[in-house]
Amino acid sequence: MRHGCRELQAEPPRDKDAANLCEFFVYRRGPAKPKEADPRAKALADLEALFKKK
């Protein structure tokens, strides 16, 4: 990403700590994507199943 932006025509902000206006920014429409289950918990469960003594 050029200067922290995916838009190639965007100019880099002069002061990153100050408020900046981006004319290319667009809100995403529609519902938010559902969050996945905790990947760490799934990985630990998979490892437990793999190394489970019989």
Image (cartoon, grey):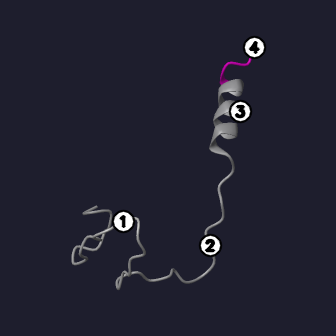
Question: Which of 32/54 is in front?
Answer: 32
Query: Picture coordinates of residue 48 (x, y %)?
Result: 71, 25
Query: What's the residue at 43%, 75% (across, down)?
Result: 19
Asked whether the residues under the numbered discs 4 and 2 touch, taking CB atoms below 8 Å apart as contact, a structural biologist would say no
Residue picked out by circle 2:
32
Rendered location of residue 6, percent (x, y): 31, 69
Badge 2: few (under 14), some or many (20 or more) residues near its Cα, within 10 Å?
Answer: few
Q: How many marks?
A: 4
Q: Amino acid at mark 2?
A: Ala
Mark 1 crowdedness (10 Å alpha carbons): few <14, some 14-19, many ≥20: few
As drawn, the residue found furthest toward the right would be 54
Judging from the image, what secondary structure is the residue with disc 4 in?
loop
Nearer to us: label 2 or label 3: 2
The vertical placement of 30 against 6, above or below, is below
The disc placed on residue 53 is: 4
Q: Is residue 1 magenta?
A: no
State how far apart marks 4 and 2 are (Cα).
41 Å
Which residues, given as a range, are shown in magenta?
A: 50-54
Please report whichever mark, 3 or 4, sits nearer to the chain's N-terminal start: 3
Q: Amino acid at mark 4?
A: Lys
Position above or below: 6 against 23? above
Q: Earlier in the sequence, mark 3 or mark 1?
A: 1
Specify the label residue 16 is tagged with.
1
For the residues labelled 1 and 4, say whether their Cβ atoms are less than 8 Å apart.
Answer: no
Element under label 2? loop
Viewer-side label of 1, 4: 1
Lower sequence index among marks 2 and 3: 2
Compared to residue 1, the image places residue 14 above or below, namely: below
Tag in front: 2 or 1: 1
Location of the C terminus by quadrant is: top right
